[in-house]
């Protein structure tokens, strides 16, 4: 359908747009996309993904940078050719 270089351009464009608009994922969304809680924790500890909390309330949810999460999404074996 698409050439490899075109897919890479589309992927990099998606990451750039997500960064520009400041899109965030919740912890649950990030865990689902990355393939598990342990993988999320590992990427956080390695500094590859950053989490933030809104100021003001003690019980606010963690937010994760969508571009960073998308960059480390675990590939689905069904689509690997």
Image: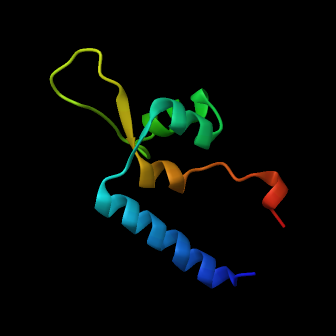
Which residue does the image show at 81% across and 53% down from the upper left? 77
For residue 61, what is the image quadrant? top left
In the rendered view, would you say 4 is above or below 51?
below
Query: In the figure, residue 11 lies in which quadrant?
Result: bottom right
Residue 6 placement (x, y as % from top left): 60, 83
Indicate the position of residue 31 as horizontal and vertical percent values.
56, 34
Residue at the farthest top position: 58
Q: Which residue sits at x=47%, y=31%? A: 27
Answer left or right for 36 relative to 17: right
Pinpoint residue 4: horizontal percent, then vertical percent: 68, 80
Query: Is residue 64 something one can see in this rendering?
Result: yes
Nearest the viewer among 38 and 1 is 1
Report the front residue among 33 and 74: 33
The answer to whether residue 50 is left or right of residue 30 is left
Which residue is pictured at 66% across the width and 48% down the height? 74
* In this rendering, position of residue 31 left or right of residue 23: right
Name the colouring of the figure: rainbow
Q: Kindly tell me whether residue 42 is visible in this rendering.
A: no
């Amino acid at each position: 359908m698409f050439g490899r270089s075109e897919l890479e351009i589309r992927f990099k464009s998606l990451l750039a747009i997500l960064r520009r608009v400041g899109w965030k994922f919740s912890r649950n969304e990030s865990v689902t996309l990355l393939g598990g809680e342990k993988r999320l924790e590992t990427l956080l500890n390695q500094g590859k993904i950053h989490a933030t909390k809104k100021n003001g309330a003690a019980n606010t949810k963690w937010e994760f940078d969508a571009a960073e999460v998308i960059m480390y999404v675990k590939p689905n074996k069904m689509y690997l050719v």
